[in-house]
Image (tube, helix red, strand yellow):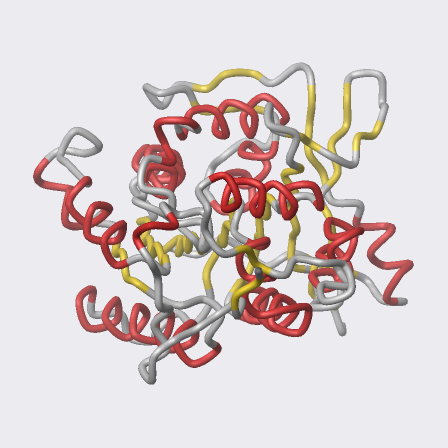
Amino acid sequence: IYVSPHRSNRLGHATMDAEDKGHRHGNFPNYYNFHPPQNRLLILEQCGLMTYIRGGLVIGADDDSKLGDDGSKLTSTRKKARLDIAACAAAVGETCSIAGKDDIIYYCDLGCNEGDLTIAMASSLWKAVHNNKKQTVRCLGLDIDSTLIERASNKFSCEVVDDKEKEEFMPVFKDCNLCSSDAHNNSCSRFFADSTKTYQEKIPRKMFSLTTIFSTTMWIHIHSGDDGLTKFLERACGWTKKYLLIEPQHSGCYRKANVRLRKMKRPEIDVSAERLKMRNQIENEIEKVVTGCGFRRVKIDLEADEQVDDVRTAWNRTLQLYERTEIDED
């Protein structure tokens, strides 16, 4: 028996049933007990993607080095991420350039659950900018589940930074139905409006330096279809100035979602390829949408000049980093 993929009230908030235990919307109550933030951070560091991100956002960061937990530099000798600028130029027929570094790094995590990974990612950036004293980090986490958002808001502690700097780094967490264009856009707009008011910036920053989407695309796809997923990705791209990091669930995960619901004797969802035509090649389909929005995929180079397209987690999901490209009209 299938149920309607998505229901929401007039305010755009999704209707959820506690008996689903997160298996219908991805709002798992104990997610980070199974996937601690360090699992992803370690992979991102080892493959060079976090080094590449810091190199593009942090003033004084060296693309060939990493920052350890104490802020010290660790030389990366195995892998290096890069954007193939020549390939970009050939594809668009123009010279491509990358935007400069801003004094404020804005980071957004879409589908943040209870915030552990969001805070860990933001902390990695904050530790890097804390050394140069020239930048700050502002962080927004959005998730469909208001209970998880409340937990996220309560989790941030002065263990990350000292009391004097805590207010400057404080992440913002808001519940938001990311299937809703209005809810998504309004949440981002309010974040920038509040940042402008709080930090007395003369001009509001309207785009995020870095946006991450960890294991969220399947849930958007299931509840809003091919068109809804496409529009969600386009919105994420539209709000992103520099880097977009996506960890999509592969096609097999869709089937497993119903297996879990079936075991709990809960109504299943129609995840058929007939309804979700993007499903069978979902990773490639996501790349098509993002690259169609002015982004290029960042590749990984190994020591022997071998190029690796996909960085995978231990649970066999790709980590796709995209970088926005600009056309130099001079």
**Up-down: is 35 above or below 253?**
above
Q: Residue furthest bottom?
A: 10
Q: Position of residue 264 (x, y in %)?
A: 44, 42
Question: Is 112 on the left-hand or right-hand side of 295?
Answer: left
**Quarter holding the N terminus?**
bottom right
Question: Is 159 on the left-hand or right-hand side of 216?
Answer: left
- Which residue: 15% across, 42% down? 165
**Up-down: is 267 above or below 299?**
below
Residue nearer the viewer, 13 or 52: 13
* Numbered-mark total: 0
Q: Position of residue 48 (x, y in %)?
A: 61, 28
- Which residue: 49% across, 56% down? 267
Q: Residue furthest left?
A: 163
Question: Is 234 on the left-hand or right-hand side of 266?
Answer: right
Quarter occupied by residue 115? top left
Quarter occupied by residue 64? top right
Question: Is 292 on the left-hand or right-hand side of 177?
Answer: right
Q: Position of residue 277 (x, y in %)?
A: 77, 63
- Which residue: 30% across, 62% down? 175
Residue nearer the viewer, 315 or 185: 315
Q: Position of residue 56 (x, y in %)?
A: 56, 45
- Which residue: 73% across, 55% down? 279
Residue nearer the viewer, 63 or 188: 188
Residue nearer the viewer, 159 or 90: 159
**Quarter holding the C terminus?**
bottom right
